[in-house]
Amino acid sequence: MSTVKTLPLLFTPIELRSVTARNRVVVSPMCQYSSAEGGPTDFHLVHLGKFAMGGAGIVFCEETSVEERGRKSYHCAGIYNDAHVAQYRRINDFIRSQGAVPAIQIGHSGRKGSGCAPWDGYRSLTADDAKHGEPPWQTVSASAVPASATSIVPQALDRSEIGALVAHWREAALRAANAGYDIIEVHAAHGYLIHQFLSPVTNQRNDAYGGDLAGRMRLCLEIVEAVRAAWPADRPVFMRVSAVDGANSRWSVDDTVELVRAAKERGAEVVTTSSGGINGPGTATLVPRYPGYHVPYAERVRAEAGVKTIAVGLITEAHHAEEILQQGQADLIALARELLWNPNWPAHAARELGVENYLELLPRGYSWWLRRREEIREVTRQAGANKG
């Protein structure tokens, strides 16, 4: 009697509205500081394309700003210009041709803008940078609280500017749909603008967008609602949150659960639970770093807010990723730096988990030759065994 072998959950397709990802492996957004005037370059085609070729189910481009001043640096990605649409579409067409789902994370740096790449120390731009064609610009935030003692003091957004900002998010969603993305994620984490409104560390307002939790959540929820309204109804909206602030934390997991419940009512249905960033670099956190250190947040948000979640945080082993899914702690697994090291991680993980046709995750021109190599190795092995 023959038995049908069950696929590991990590390599079981998942349906998200009309979008079906071939597996649960997600390529996290990874800022590359390689854009030109906000738009992608050939670097991005190769950078993102190799993840699709390596077998990932969903491939996120890096955090992409909804307006020019919302970039972290002059070299960060944006989708605030109609000229960007065709540039991204070219990349998305290739990602889709390789069997993966193209996804975009849209955000705004807020007070963390007008800066340099991490390898230049995340420092703010200065008059010296202006001499080289990169003058500092005025940043914005919930309140006029600088990110550090040496950072530019941001301008506190007034009510009319907040309305214009929400419109930028709506326009970015329309451009992203036109560019061929199937998934859009609202970036509300890592100390960037939405997070600056959420956290009482940075939000010292006394109007409708500050004060209590409901006031501090208002901008985030208005943005989610605007993006959902602009985004095609058959495609899903994701959201990324910092479950806790990090240094001097005054944003709790309880707050996160309440935010996600409210965002779900407005159309967000998949949540990536990260942490930190309100002070220091985007991912600065006091949460101890160990494999899967964000998984407890994903599990709690999934259970208490009733949304699908993505687990992130030093998940590099196939069996660990599968265990997270099997235990119901998350619905998808996101990797970042591990994929920079090994963009074929999905195919390797599939082999490790016993997926028979794991080579089919790779392009035919790869899989045919690799399968042939395995056959030759097997023949050689058997010949050696017979001699013994």
Image (tube, grey):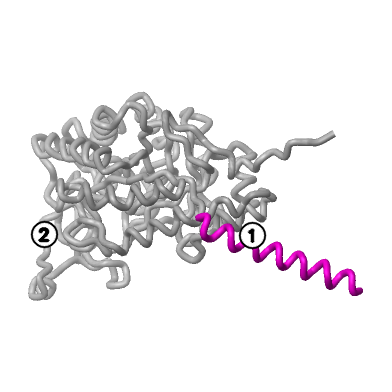
Residue at point 36% right, 24% down? 265
Numbered circle sitting on residue 137: 2
- Gap in Å between the C-alphas at discs 1 and 2? 54 Å
Q: In this view, does 308 lie to the left or right of 194?
A: right
Return the x and y of residue 20 as percentages of the image width and height. 47, 36
| Badge nearest the viewer, 1 or 2 | 1
Would residue 283 appear left or right of 6 to someone viewing this image? Answer: left
Name the residue: 59% across, 63% down: 369
Q: What stretch is highlighted in magenta?
A: 363-388
Does residue 212 appear in this view? no
**What amino acid is found at the position of numbered circle 1 in the picture?**
Arg
Front residue of 32 and 72: 32
SS assignment at label 1: helix
In terms of depth relative to the viewer, which is nearer, 108 or 236? 236
Q: Residue at x 16, y 36 (%)?
A: 167
Farthest top residue in view: 265
Q: Where is residue 293 in the image (x, y as percent from the top left)?
A: 53, 52
Residue 93 drawn at (x, y percent): 34, 47
Q: In this view, does 158 lie to the left or right of 229?
A: left
Residue 215, x across and y down, in percent: 25, 31
* Mark 1 lies on residue: 371
Secondary structure, magenta segment, majority class: helix
Is residue 6 visible to us here?
yes
The quarter of the image holding the N terminus is: top right
State which tag comes first along the sequence, 1 or 2.
Answer: 2
Residue 379 located left or right of residue 236: right
Q: Does the segment drawn in magenta span residue 61?
A: no
Callout 2, which amino acid? Trp
Q: Dot 1, crowdedness within 10 Å: few (<14), some or many (≥20)?
A: some
Callout 2: few (<14), some (14-19), or many (20+) C-alpha neighbours within 10 Å? some
Report the front residue among 97 and 235: 97
